[in-house]
Image: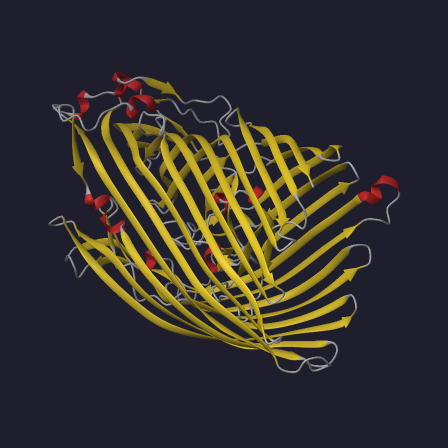
Amino acid sequence: SVNYNEGEARYANVRGTEPRLNSVMLDGERIPSADAETRAVQLDLIPADMVQTIEVNKTVTSDMDADAIGGSINLITRQAPNSQRFTLTLGSGYNFLAEKPMLNGSFVIGRRAMKEKFGMVISGTLNDHRLGSDNVEGTWRITRDGDLYPKEWEIRTYQIRRLRRSISAAFDFQINEYNKLFFNSQYNHRDDWENRFRLQYLLQDPDKNGVSQQTEIRRQTKAGLNNDRFDNARLEDQRSTLASLKGKHIFADFLEMKWSISYAEARETRPHERYLEWQVEKIPVKVDLSSLRTPSFYEHAPADAFFFRDLSEEFKSTREVDSRTGFDFSLPLIQGGKYKNSLSFGGAFKSKDKKRENRYERIIPVGVDSSHSLLMVQTPLIDATKSDFLAGAYQAGLYTKPDFIGGLNFDDGSRFERKDIPSQYASLNYTVDEGISAAYVLLEQNLGKKLKMKAGVRIEQTKVKNHGHQYNENDHIVTPQTGTATYKNILPGLQFKYDWDDNTILRFAYSNTLARPNFYSMVPYREINKNDEELTEGNPGLLPTTSMNLDCSAEKYLAAIGLLSAGLFYKDITNFIYVFNANDYRDPVSGNTYDEYFQPRNGAKANLIGLETSFQRQLTFLPGILSNLSIYLNYTHTTSRTENPEFGDRQISLPGSSADILNINVYWQSKKINCGISFNYTSPYIDPDEVDLTPGLERYYDQVTYLDINGSYVMHPNLRFYLEVNNLLNQPLRYYAGISERTLQQEYYNIRLTAGIKYDLQ
């Protein structure tokens, strides 16, 4: 299953485990993450047109990287074809929320030369998409009377343009029958231009009539510079570069060696991110909680009552660089016969360098006696209200136009003063240097004609050095901090494969895997939220989460091009990282007392047991054109629990673990027509990024049901028309607090349609 962002799949969950517990690779090499705080890889940075095959390994052998508790996802790019090939795709589409068209284009060029010894393929893609979302977000609290009541409520309108450009190249060269070289590379660049209009209610406990008498209301516009590059919008610039050189060699007709050198980089920059915010204070607001999904707020705060609150400019940058060198050897011991075997061994060294550099400046108007003398109505306004706002019957109202904010010259000393605010960013900046040394040995042994075994062990040693910052709010001094960690993991594995008959396979696997802590969690930082009187610290002593895994499965290959499979799996997870929480915490560093204290720590235990089934078949037994139908479905059910030291005897399900996942794909194909419909259901689960698990306020990712259709028509042997319609059920991204009706976030994207033509010459 996948998590969505702005209507596009971003993070992948395997077997009901959160993205942090899975690994994502490109052509067998790990992809770095542009996410500043987690190791999870954002899949929407890589266009689907650049991927030929997706390979999912749910169990790992000793010759594979161990950081894959849920599984590993390998995105395989196009490889050199056996003959000359040229493909060109041109298309457009329409987003029904943004009410804007889109542009799609891609190409593939491939051929072989030098008497078939040299192969090459070059591909590229361009996608220009206008999109957006209708969003509401809130936080809930327990009032003095013990009731649950909204603390904040926001109505957000997003307007986005997303532009992707990607190019990849793959080459292979057969030196001779014993030596072959491979080179793969890919460059991805995604720009997001975003304007956001936010209406925010900051509510006090209600009186007996349900009125929050002292409500503060804010209106905020998000914008960027006024030039061709920024176009008055917040620009998020994401790029990834991946390159690998590999070799395959055979010595003395029996010893096989494979080696690889790879480099990968991912970075995200958000420069000149501007916010202008206005407010009114002490406004009575009537809150109607008859619908907890979409509470109603009744107030009278005219536009000319909003006065200046804040103007700021932020600069954000995150960069991760991964490099890897690996060697693998395979040595046959007994060749041929019922007891054929081979010994594989090898190792790898991997390094990760991650850095985040943020900066925040408050922009202060010069010569202004009071913020009340600057009014929102003195700026050019835009009405962001939509008659068909999908997230509820809300009126967004008036905001300052983005082009006005983008046109302000903050370097004009006669009008503005720039003030550096380290309390907003100092604790967020960090660097992490991580080195991983790995070695393994793996025996592949035939135990008769039908039974095969793989037995091995992998050792990984990790060394980490972190640099973070502490900000002292008393003297406003930023103090650099350094933390280190070293740990070793010994990870045995055992797999059996039994060929019951020519079409039936039984499998069993025992494996040990791990998930290293998120980068930011390991940093020795201190973050102070003075508004909420909260203190959060990192923990450089964190150890990886480890899992002992048992898997057994059966596969039956059907004569009519089909497969039926079923499996059971169990994961015993230790050192699961939870967030320690203390109330009325006295800080030994500053001497201050904070209402709440948070720090990630090891110590939680968890287990997960699951059943998975899948079925696919061409329905050739049906009459007439119905015999062209095929069906593919899979279903996974998991049960999990976590024993958190914070909970005492209380147990919760594993964060990020969905109890039920169902995928169904039905498609019909003939020589000229190919069409299909796909359905996905994922049940709710606790948000793995949750820090507050107060009973009744646990943050859940709500259930989702997605329905998509696609089809194509062959107009000519080399020319094809295609059509895709996504999100037919208008499924929102939704979180809730404790019960499904109590909304924390509800974001709608509407339907997206794409169509075009594809020219393919082979």
Q: Residue at x 60, y 56 (%)?
A: 55
**Residue 710 screen position, x and y as percent:** 67, 37
Can see residue 293?
no
Can see residue 110?
yes
617 w.r.t. 192: above or below = below
Report whether 218 appears left or right of 350: left
Q: Residue furthest front?
A: 114
Q: Residue at x 76, y 67 (%)?
A: 504
What is the tally of numbered marks visible in this picture? 0
**Residue 691 screen position, x and y as percent:** 37, 54
Residue 309, image quadrant: top left
- For the residue pair 609 and 694, the one nearer the viewer reads as 609
Q: Residue furthest right?
A: 623
How has the structure been colored for display? Answer: secondary structure
Which image quarter is the C terminus in?
top right
**Residue 267 screen position, x and y as percent:** 38, 46
- For the residue pair 383 and 65, the one nearer the viewer reads as 65
- For the residue pair 445 and 547, the one nearer the viewer reads as 445
753 w.r.t. 338: above or below = above
**Residue 48 screen position, x and y as percent:** 56, 43
Q: Residue at x 58, y 42 (%)?
A: 49
Q: Residue at x 24, y 40 (%)?
A: 360
